[in-house]
Image: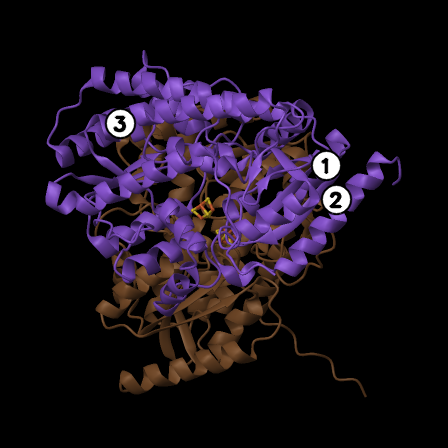
Chain colours: A brown, B purple
Amino acid sequence: MSTAAPPLSARQQFLRRAEDCYRDYSLQSVQDWKAATGGLAIGYMPIYIPRELLHSQGVLPVGLMGGGDDLEIIRGDAYYQSYICHIPRSTIELGLNGSLDPLDGMLFPAICDVIRNLSGMWKLLFPDKFAMYLDVPQDFHRLRGGRFWRQELEQLASQLTACGARPYDPDALRESLALYNTNRRLVQALYDLRIREPWRVPTSELYPLLRAGMVLPVETFTSWLEEFYQLLLADDTCRPMDQARVLLTGSFCEQPPLGLIRTLERAGCYIVDDDFAIIHRWLQHDIPLEGDPLENLANAFLEDAMASPTRYIDEAVKGAELVQRVQASRAEGVLFCAPSFCDPALLDQPMTVAAIEAAGIPWTAFKYSENTGQFQVIREQAGTFADALKLWSGH
Amino acid sequence: MSTSPPVVQKDSSQIRQKEMIAAHFHRLALSPETGENNVYTFVPGNLTELIRAFDLLPVLPEINALQSGMRGKSREYIALAEKAGHSEDVCTYVKCDLGMMKSGNIGPTGERLPDPDLLLLSYTGCFTFLKWFEILQQEYKAPVVMLHVPYQGDGTITPHMRDYVVEQLRDKVIPALEEISGQAYDEAKLKGLLARSRQAEDDLVWVLQSARHRPSPIDAYFGAVYYVGPIFSAFRGTEEAVGYYRALREEVEERMAAGLGPVTPEGQLAEERYRVVVEGPPNWTSFREFWQMFVDEGAVVVASTYTKVGGTYDFGFRHDPEHPLETLADYCLGCYTNLNFPSRIDMLCRYIEEYQADGFLINSVKSCNSFSAGQLLILREVERRTGRPGGFIESDLVDPRYFSPANIKNRLESYFQMLDQKRSGGH
Ligand code: SF4
Ligand code: SF4
């Protein structure tokens, strides 16, 4: 007698769709979009690129976040010593095995030395494809960094045009800014809902959606966010559990495998704030639509971006933003969860730990790589931490 | 069997260089009493002339870290930093510097270094520098001023990159230096310093290019790290630097005229058997042992990329006193670690051709992503373009846990054997 699996709920179906979408390394959704629109698709490495500008020129920005735990690295390892993080080798693997063929080019934002070097490697390995290193200012003054950044954006726009994109048009950019403003608000709404009722929004479900949002056109991603929000509200089966509220930080580039996120939740943690797929929340407010849209886009980077380890933070504010995030998310503790060999995350950690400790916030730390397969040690560590938090906070 | 310690051979320029550096550290040690102010800054993208134009004294944390490595102190310093929560995965220069600070900030000459009066975050080509000074800012509570130097992602310096650097120099860096020094910016003084830099740079390039001769009168890696010391650190723009490079040049001219090879720690190199180009920084904790492995094989390094981290002069750049801020910007933008991969590869290929090298070696440094991430592609690409064999060794700058002498020696021996086979027509 065969027992048929019970039918998937609407929520489960939705999540499967999101997971299939982001795990599809052949970029089928991108291919479909290109076939339908005839537009260019440009890949980018994590953290931040001005997606609004690309969108306004009819270009699909495609966020690449390595190969996760799905990809067998065959050739990528030949380019990197063992003491370099995992994401550049899996990205090269994807390039060499043809997965990234649907892309018309690549953008390498200034994140760290690894990505910086990868930009030049890409030029050598894929000489026929467009590849650009996008330097972001570390001077956040409008007249200096602002002018520089604006010129970088103008250069990007004209290079995209040279590859076949529409020329820069301020009205089109204004429309794109509006679309992304809406999109960011919806992402934020899910984060807010998770803060209020974390049992309703498990991170292991929110995360695949955010990842899918990196390869989908913004219009589609926006509709998916709305759909997910409605599904969550309609689902009254979720009940609060006795879990500890934690903020997870350090995973802004190479991402942990989904299994690790699930493990943390199973170990008793509600992740109420995180750094995953951070581009969706990199800018924290709407970009104004009045005035010069390119100027507004440039200023938003200077003045409204998150305090990431990849940004220079000058006197006296290091770690302050993390403390604020802990307070805003009502997290009881912090998980420092960084990829092995990730210089920006690991060099930042002692400084932010100092700020967290000064604020009396408990923390613990561990490392991963995108293809980590064994979670037992992390499970025990996170479980012990969650238990301790529950004890301290008098659950 | 003799029991006397081995005599370390030094040429007179090396002795002079040592004295200059010792005097600088002594001056720094006395500065709390003399009232001289200092500026902590980095080697790649250093603005020594500008700092000196305000009569401020430069302090280079990387130089302190490498000196700690050479003096056998780095193990203990790194351990201290790791105990304080710094990851085993990150740049060991940073940890070595922090450990030194936590141990009382005793510099290479045994005297105490002053705390920073200003942290001048002028850096090129490495993100770790940002973090490093964020950490120091937190530790010392010193004021910090940042000069962001854009990366040459497309292999060129564009006017907008240069303008951005000049604006930061004019509107931010100079006012900060004025404040710390209590002196107004004096462009004529800066021009004078830049003119002296130029003179010294001419002589330095002449010395480095002397390695084109056979036999090469210098070792352009192990020996040259001493040569670049003054110009990459505290002395560019000074009369002392001009005098040092003039004397060094004369010394090398004499060696060349006499048909001599480089001076090594054990004396005159008897025979130049291999000419190689080296990419990547040296190891400092076993510097002498590492050099000796080359000497034992009769291998001379005829060009290296490491000696360009504090400025790439051999392709024509010189400081230009007529355009003081623009030339400082171009200098920063042109340092080796600010070059993209295709440019780094071009440079190696050019060195191999121009210096008639038999092959090239990469010393991949474990904790330095800036140099190391992707070096295996450099290896492959340079081999493909030049047809000359490449070798690959791994060590670290100042973490003695990552220097494995037997392993490196083995690799070097087989590499040189490969060069022999290649010469004799084998494969
Ligand atoms: S994981 Fe860290 S070190 Fe690696 S590429 Fe990303 S930011 Fe750079
Ligand atoms: S990572 Fe490399 S270039 Fe950067 S500070 Fe460390 S040793 Fe220097």
First-in-chain label (3 vs 1)? 3
Pointer 1 and pointer 2: residues touching (CB < 8 Å)? yes
First-in-chain label (3 vs 2)? 3
Instruction: Look at the image and tell me in which quarter the C terminus of chain B lies.
Output: top right
Residue at the spot of label 2: B416
Q: CA distance from mark 1 to mark 2?
A: 10 Å
In the rendered view, tell whether residue A393 sits above or below residue A356. Answer: below
Residue at the spot of label 3: B50
Q: Amino acid at mark 1?
A: Arg
Residue A293 spot, x, y in % from top left = 35, 29
First-in-chain label (1 vs 2)? 1
The structure residue drawn at horizontal position 27% and vertical position 16%, both measured from the top left corner, is: B191
Instruction: Count numbered badges in the picture.
Output: 3
Chain ID at mark 2: B
Task: Mark 3: give few (<14), some (14-19) or many (20+) Cα within 10 Å.
Answer: many
Chain ID at mark 1: B
Residue B80 spot, x, y in % from top left = 36, 66
Which element type, helix, strand or loop, lies under badge 1? loop
Residue nearest the observer in this picture, A362 or B94: B94
The answer to which image quadrant residue B87 occupies is bottom left
Q: CA distance from mark 3 to mark 2?
A: 45 Å
Mark 1 or mark 2, which is nearer to you? 1
The answer to which image quadrant residue A190 occupies is bottom left
Q: Amino acid at mark 2?
A: Phe
Residue nearest the observer in this picture, B97 or A256: B97
Pointer 3 and pointer 2: residues touching (CB < 8 Å)? no
The structure residue drawn at horizontal position 79% and vertical position 84%, both measured from the top left corner, is: A2
Image disc number at residue B273: 1
Residue A103 spot, x, y in % from top left = 64, 38
